[in-house]
Image (cartoon, rainbow, N blue to C red):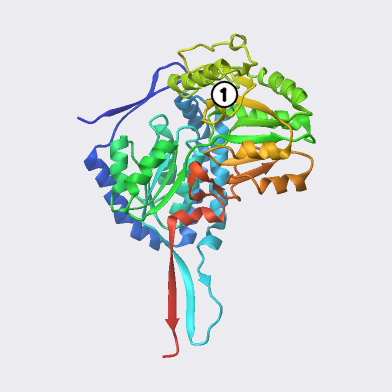
């Protein structure tokens, strides 16, 4: 008898989706089919692959309202924002389609009499994409689209919290005319996911999730020498210099810290503010945070929804309680926010000061609606504290001095550096990280690298 996967909605605790988990034989069957059809798909012209992928994006967009509703109920994003991820899915997908000809074109070498030499890009075969629940649409398309364009077949495994996202993506590509088996989804247990990674047919894995889960993925793939893309944790910092445009800095960093209830790998979790503007910045920041409306995600007035599950909210609450016991000051009274209640996924935003790096809330990924704010006296102190982390996804500086900011940015240990913005993915820029944030990259022209292998042709023509 097969196991059943239940998706509990954070909105009201109801079962929103229930799906049987694939057993071992079903997993093997899907992998076998993916391998079987991949060769034929790789021989389809790139022009035709692009056409099918473009039609898939159109089909996905046409179902935007239903997809947004499903997203709202599965992981708790407020309905007023949910459709935005469908739009970013489409933007990223279309950009990747637009650069495919250039990225996948043969690389010609310099002329050499009597020889023809060039380098081609070949697909790796079957790609396994393991997608997260917090951004379950645009995160997987970062991998699915370049993998398909490069001639691979793809198996999509979503979090148990967002299984309908996998189904909707596959449905759109099927409607667009993608041959059967080229893109499939699997709802499967952790054990069977590890088994799939170990399968000899899998040529690459793209994973987004926690550091402990990334370690498991890397161990499962050990000794196979396949391509691995691992986007893991984050504890992203920002620095507000003394010459920052205050209103813009406050608006940007509040949104960067609390959008999606803080459940973003590149969300702002640590803020360092120059002492000369600290008080003014803090007052404006707190006032802005108090404007949020905590509520059910299906309420169009809600701007801060519940966390994905009660255990996630309790984790963040415990970080806050521990920090306050260690001397931190909490500036938000949760009683001012309707629905905030211990033992539920509904949690008011919180701003902490008097914090330092001995506190878990300043070093351990929170993934929730809390941010710590520290006063600093110099650029040097800010950079030292920003780099004092096991993670390195993004970092940002708010300042009127762009030249100085870029100089400081060169000292930051992060995959993406922002000036006067934060918490944003530009599809033309590579998305990557350093330290325990992981390895590999997505987006940009470099985002195809995990799904292709280079092959050199060295032809002597004057025999």
Q: Position of residue 439 (x, y in %)?
A: 48, 48
Residue found 44% across the figure and 42% down from its top: 172
Q: Position of residue 72 (x, y in %)?
A: 50, 26
At label 1, counting other C-alpha atoms closer than 10 Å, the crowd grade (few under 14, some 14-19, many 20 or more) is many
Relative vertical location of residue 437 with respect to residue 124 in this rendering, above or below: above
Q: Nearer the viewer, residue 240 or 179?
A: 240
Relative horizontal placement of residue 288, taking residue 21 as reference (left or right):
right
Image quadrant assignment for residue 293: top right
Relative vertical location of residue 411 with respect to residue 12 in this rendering, above or below: below
Q: Kindly state the secondary structure of the residue where label 1 is placed.
A: loop
Relative horizontal placement of residue 323, taking residue 274 as reference (left or right):
left
Relative horizontal placement of residue 111, taking residue 292 as reference (left or right):
left
Residue found 54% across the figure and 12% down from its top: 340
Please tell me how many numbered marks the rendered image carries. 1
Q: Nearer the viewer, residue 188 or 153?
A: 188
Q: Position of residue 211 (x, y in %)?
A: 44, 38
Task: Provide the residue designation for mark 1.
Answer: 369
Does residue 99 appear anywhere in the picture?
Answer: yes
Q: Which residue is farthest top?
A: 335
Q: Position of residue 39 (x, y in %)?
A: 34, 60
């Amino acid at each position: 008898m097969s196991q059943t996967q239940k998706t509990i909605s954070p909105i009201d605790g109801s079962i929103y989706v229930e799906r049987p988990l694939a057993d071992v034989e079903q997993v093997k069957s899907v992998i076998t089919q993916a391998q079987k059809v991949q060769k034929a798909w790789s021989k389809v012209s790139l022009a035709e692959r692009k056409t099918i992928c473009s039609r898939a994006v159109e089909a996905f967009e046409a179902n935007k309202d239903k997809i947004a509703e499903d997203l709202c109920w599965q992981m708790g994003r407020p309905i007023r924002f949910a459709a935005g991820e469908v739009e970013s899915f489409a933007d990223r997908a279309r950009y990747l389609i637009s650069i495919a000809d250039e990225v996948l074109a043969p690389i010609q070498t310099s002329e050499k009499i009597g020889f023809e030499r060039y380098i081609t890009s070949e697909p790796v075969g079957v790609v396994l994409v393991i997608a997260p629940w917090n951004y379950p649409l645009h995160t997987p398309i970062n991998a699915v689209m370049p993998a398909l364009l490069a001639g691979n077949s793809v198996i999509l495994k979503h979090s148990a919290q967002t299984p309908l996202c996998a189904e909707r993506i596959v449905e759109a590509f099927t409607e667009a005319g993608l041959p059967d088996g080229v893109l499939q989804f699997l709802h499967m247990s952790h054990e069977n996911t590890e088994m799939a990674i170990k399968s000899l047919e899998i040529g690459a894995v793209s994973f987004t999730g926690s550091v402990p889960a990334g370690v498991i993925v890397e161990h499962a793939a050990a000794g196979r020498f396949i391509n691995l893309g691992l986007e893991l944790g984050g504890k992203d910092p920002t620095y507000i210099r003394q010459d920052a445009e205050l209103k813009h800095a406050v608006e940007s960093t509040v949104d960067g810290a609390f959008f999606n209830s803080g459940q973003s790998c590149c969300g702002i979790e640590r803020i360092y503010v120059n002492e000369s503007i600290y008080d003014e910045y803090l007052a404006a920041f707190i006032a802005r945070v108090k404007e949020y409306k905590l509520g059910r995600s299906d309420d169009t007035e809600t701007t801060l929804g519940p966390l994905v599950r009660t255990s996630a909210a309790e984790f963040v609450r415990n970080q806050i309680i521990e920090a306050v016991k260690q001397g931190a000051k909490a500036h938000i009274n949760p009683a001012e926010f309707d629905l905030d209640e211990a033992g539920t996924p509904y949690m008011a935003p919180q701003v902490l000061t008097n914090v330092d790096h001995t506190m878990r809330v300043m070093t351990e990924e929170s993934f929730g609606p809390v941010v710590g704010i520290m006063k600093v006296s110099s650029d040097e102190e800010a950079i030292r504290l920003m780099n004092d982390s096991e993670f390195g996804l993004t970092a940002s500086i708010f300042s009127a001095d762009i030249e100085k900011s870029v100089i400081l940015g060169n000292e930051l240990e992060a995959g993406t550096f922002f000036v006067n913005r934060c918490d944003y993915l530009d599809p033309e820029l590579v998305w990557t990280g350093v330290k325990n944030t992981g390895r590999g990259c997505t987006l940009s022209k470099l985002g195809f690298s995990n799904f292709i292998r280079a092959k050199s042709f060295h032809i002597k023509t004057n025999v």
